[in-house]
Image (tube, rainbow, N blue to C red):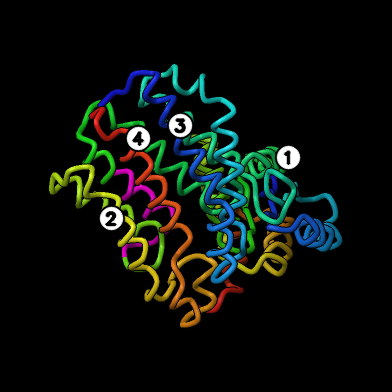
Amino acid sequence: MSNVGIVIVSHSPLVAQGAADMVRQMVSHDVPLAWCGGDPSGGLGTSVEDILAAIERAWSDAGVAILVDLGGAETNSEMAVEMLGEPRAGKVVVCNAPIVEGAVMAATEASGGATLAQVLATAQELMPA
Amino acid sequence: MTLPPAILSALIDRVTGEIIAHADELTALDAAIGDSDHGVNMKRGAEAVRAERDAFAAKPLGEALKAIGTKLVMTIGGASGPLYGTLAMSLGREIESGSLAEALAHATDAVAARGKSTVGQKTMLDVLYPAVEALRQGKVPSELPALLDAAAESTIPMKALRGRASFLGERSVGHMDPGARSAAIIANTIVKTLEGTL
């Protein structure tokens, strides 16, 4: 797949899956997409191991954009990206954007063949300056 | 510094034991200003480390800390996973070659970078930086617990600027930061275990 991939990381698997469903409806299978949610015991939270696995599932040589909800999802996602190691870590970004709207906008942009930088910019336009 | 396997094993036993024993207290602190999971998350990390205590204790101190850090990252689940994981991994990189004070200073800077935070924002950094200062000033181990408990308590009047507690703004004032408390528990347990062996 040459389009940028999208990963959705929420504290809640229901939120992550729901957001992914909305993305899928918009972009069909033109964009590699994966989601994860829940801590290593299945409670609300996030898991670095699950985030790493989601990045693998959504991997694209064009890069991967990660959408997160609250604090720990961001910190754990940044940790996961670092653990990927270079050169792959340099092709993954964590977007500063609302998770649902950001995922839909980022995926729509990605489905048109946009670069990772364009996908990131489109998602982050949603954030108040 | 280096540690013989028996001391490292005792250290892992005591630190993880204290975290597990204080899990309810940490969760109660987090319930006041966060998402009520700090104790549960730290306990999960502590139990995972405890389960592999012998394997960690058999490694040289630096390698052991790096391996423990990775384990914490993969098991804790909340933001404290990458934060404590980064602390341990960064300490592991320097602890055998440099002074403890400077290794902890660099590890604390790494935690600050990971959390995009700094001192005075009602976080674990408000305990870690005073610990660095105390070591640099050559305080004796018996002075540290009171000093670090006071550092954790200094977060009570602070307004949270990072993490979930920052959503509460002024309402975060009046509660001790759970991360500062867990950092004090860990640091004090390390000091008390090593007192007399250093």
Q: Are the two marked residues, 2 and 1, in contact with CB atoms closer than 8 angstroms? A: no
Q: Amino acid at mark 1?
A: Arg
Q: Amino acid at mark 3?
A: Ile
Task: For label 3, count other residues whose C-alpha is less than 10 Å away and answer few (under 14), some (14-19) or many (20+).
Answer: many
Q: Residue at x 31, y 63 (%)?
A: B119
The range drawn in magenta is: B106-119
Residue B158 showing in the rendered view: yes
Image position, residue B31 (x, y; %): 59, 67
Q: What whole-number distance in Å separates the C-alpha atoms at marks 4 and 3?
A: 10 Å
Residue picked out by circle 3: B12
Residue picked out by circle 2: B146
Q: What whole-number distance in Å separates the C-alpha atoms at marks 1 and 4?
A: 45 Å
Task: For label 1, count other residues whose C-alpha is less than 10 Å away and answer few (under 14), some (14-19) or many (20+).
Answer: some
Residue picked out by circle 4: B193
The image quadrant that residue B150 belongs to is: bottom left
Please determine if labels 4 and 2 lie on a single subunit. Answer: yes
Image position, residue A15 (x, y; %): 77, 62
Q: Earlier in the sequence, mark 4 or mark 2?
A: 2
In which quadrant will I find the C terminus of chain B? top left
Residue closest to the eye, A37 or B128: B128
Q: What whole-number distance in Å separates the C-alpha atoms at marks 1 and 3?
A: 36 Å
Please determine if labels 3 and 2 lie on a single subunit. Answer: yes
Q: What whole-number distance in Å separates the C-alpha atoms at marks 3 and 2?
A: 22 Å
Above or below residue B106? Residue B161 is: below
Q: Amino acid at mark 4?
A: Thr
Q: What whole-number distance in Å separates the C-alpha atoms at marks 4 and 2?
A: 15 Å
Task: For label 4, count other residues whose C-alpha is less than 10 Å away and answer few (under 14), some (14-19) or many (20+).
Answer: some
Q: What whole-number distance in Å separates the C-alpha atoms at marks 2 and 1?
A: 49 Å
Q: Secondary structure at mark 1?
A: helix
Chain letter for mark 4, please.
B
Q: Are the two marked residues, 3 and 2, in contact with CB atoms closer than 8 angstroms? A: no
